[in-house]
Image (tube, rainbow, N blue to C red):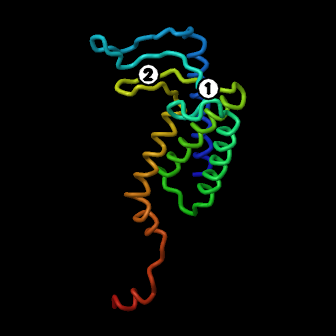
Amino acid sequence: MIMIFWLLSAAFVVIDRLTKAAAEANIEGNEIIRVLTAGETDILAFSLHKNTGAAFSSFTGKTAALAAVTAVGLILITIYFHRQKHKHPLMTVSYAMIVGGGIGNLYDRIFQGYVTDFIRLFPFNFIFNFADICVVIGAILLIAYYLFIDEKYLKKFTPKDTSEVENDK
């Protein structure tokens, strides 16, 4: 599962870099590219935004601090994942999405000084990118894993207490 984790993480970073490069090459200034509309409402649109903050443009201008916090968080998440003795496939994919997305946005912060956002999706009133999608979906899947699967999955690897076995006779 370790190899799958790293391959998926790398794939998410590559997809993020490619989508951001495509957005930067094809969307100009304040241009809005409407992909899917319903009447006057843009369901899916693309527009370029250079975000120097975090989610919802919070902490704007704190790029170095955000990069440091992100780097430390990614290191801790990766260490935690690697220390898990039994890795369920959903856990692996979830952590890979979070780490891949985190690396994608960290790359932007370090090398550009901002994160490239370009996706607008109704009904949300903000702009995001592929890395953001990875982090959010990865976090949701991870919560679902820990709520519904983890305990049952780990029971498969826990030996029965010998006293319970003797009492069953």
Q: Quarter holding the C terminus?
A: bottom left
* Closer to us: 49 or 106: 49
Residue 101's spot in the image, x, y percent? 57, 37
Q: Which residue is mark 2?
A: 120
The spot of residue 141 in percent (x, y) is 43, 47
Q: CA distance from mark 1 to mark 2?
A: 18 Å
Instruction: Work out which residue is located at the far left of the displayed protein and give it.
Output: 39
Percent coordinates x, y for residue 73 in the rendering: 63, 48
Decide if residue 104 is on the left or right side of residue 157.
right
Circles 1, 2 touching at the beta carbon (< 8 Å): no
Q: What residue is drawn where x is 50% and y is 31%?
A: 56
Q: Which mark is residue 17?
A: 1
Tell me if residue 133 comes above or below residue 68 in the rendering.
Answer: above
How many numbered discs, if any? Answer: 2
Amino acid at pointer 2: Arg
Amino acid of disc 1: Arg
Location of residue 161 (image quadrant): bottom left
Q: Is residue 107 left or right of residue 26?
A: right
The crowd level at tag 2 (other Cα within 10 Å; few <14, some 14-19, many 20+) is many
- Tell me residue 25's x, y (percent): 60, 11
Along the line of sight, the residue nearer the viewer: 144 or 122? 122
